Amino acid sequence: MDRSTDRQGPASTLGLYLHIPFCRSKCDYCDFYSLPGGEDRMDGYLRALLRQLEEAAPGAAGHSVDTVYVGGGTPTVFGGERLAALLAAVGRLYRLAPGAEITCEANPDSAGEELLRALRRAGFGRLSLGMQSADAGELAAVHRRHTPEQTDAAVAAARRVGFENLSLDLICGLPGQTEESWRRTVEHALSLRPEHLSCYGLKVEEGTPLARRVAAGEELPDDDAQADRYLWTVERLARAGFRQYEISNFARPGYESRHNLRYWRLEPYLGFGPGAHSDFGGRRFAVPADLAGYLAGEAVPAGETVSPWERGNEYLMLGLRTAAGIAGEEYRRRFGGDFAPLEELLSRFAGHGWAERNGDRWRLTPAGFLVSNRLIGALLEAREGAEGPGT
């Protein structure tokens, strides 16, 4: 396998993503590959994941794994023993870097103290908890199983067993949410003293129960309300000591998600489990979202080689999601392109308050993040107009 950087960042480090597709029930907005129930297939799934980890290990022998992320679904319904077995296999099969960031996602209703203690003993050091809201009615409206009280209990249990790196997920724009209830959710999250907060705007994904509800006439907070809440959140979290380092992510200094930064920085990662994606050795590939096929050993990853032209587009799209932004010298060095047409457009964005410059680097402002899809689309068009598709 090609071990070169492929203009993808450092080749010596690697992230691993392990997907656990099981959950107790599916939320109305969720379009991730996850399946309610499935307890009878969990032991078989563990064997299948261990098999894939073993098969991929020789190709990663030249890399040091510095981030491991177990996501879902709801990984904690998989059980502490199985999760510990997965992490032990990673340590046995891969070169796990000292101080590696090792994260497990959890929902409050499945994050009891005994399980969390097992995760800490196994080596998990970071917990990402799906709080979503501090309002019981909002949680019920999208069929979240947990209550606000269970969130508080899960946070307290996590601290008791030794988790010192805690992230809370919040969703802005839930059905029935008001500006006041959103502010109460943010304030309650701050009172729990997490090191990291992910504040996502609700997306209505095609094929979900929420999409069907909206098609039937249910109303959600409109774009103006979402924008006001977003800008208030950025300002409020800054006052609380949280640095915004990506459109939806905020952290106390030193607690940024190193694994997620890997995606945005075009650094290599391998994904395991049905529906998991990889970007490694100059290729993108994904495991088919087919649990039965995966258990049978028939889910063969399919992928494609990433051209330098595509990688340059990814640099713009993903870099401008982050507070670090993009830089002209870096762009020219990595992709050999002419940055001047992009810089001209970024200067125009700055005139509208959507972008700002710091030396050679350009980043979007919080107001620019609100319209980032439009701005990034314009930059991609400008790049194509100036350079034409590469190879």
Image (cartoon, rainbow, N blue to C red):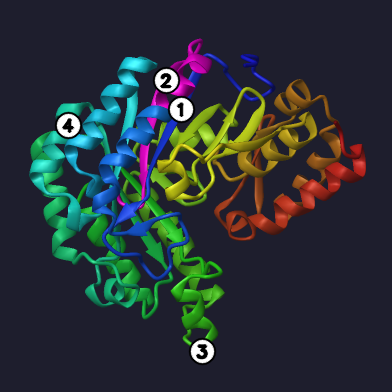
Identify the residue position indicated by label 4 in the image: 120
* 177 vs 63: above or below: below
Q: Quadrant of residue 375?
A: bottom right
**Mark 2 touches mark 1? (CB < 8 Å):** yes
- The dot on residue 217 is 3
The residue labelled by disc 1 is 15
Q: Tell me which numbered mark, 2 or 3, is placed earlier along the sequence.
A: 2
- Residue at the disc numbered 2: 65
Please say whether residue 353 is visible from this viewpoint.
Answer: no
The residue lying at 47 percent from left, 79 percent from top is 220
In the displayed structure, 174 sits above or below 11; it is: below
Instruction: Name the side, left or right, on which 91 lies relative to 290.
Output: left
Whether pointer 4 and pointer 1 mark residues with C-beta atoms closer than 8 Å, the reply is no
Element under disc 2: strand
Which is more N-terminal, label 1 or label 2? 1
Asked if 117 appears above or below 372 in the picture, the reply is: above
Count residues near mark 4 (Cα–Cα under 10 Å), then give few for <14, some for 14-19, many for 20+: some
State the separation of the CA atoms marked 3 and 1.
Answer: 42 Å
Q: Position of residue 379 (x, y in %)?
A: 78, 47
Residue at point 85% right, 31% down? 391
Instruction: Give whichever of discs 2 and 4 has the lower sequence position.
Output: 2
Magenta region: which residues? 53-75
Residue 260, how many percent across, how many down? Answer: 46, 38
User: Looking at the picture, does residue 233 appear above or below residue 336?
Assistant: below
First along the sequence among labels 4 and 3: 4
Measured Cα–Cα span from mark 2 to mark 4:
19 Å
**Residue 61 at what x, y percent from top left?**
48, 12
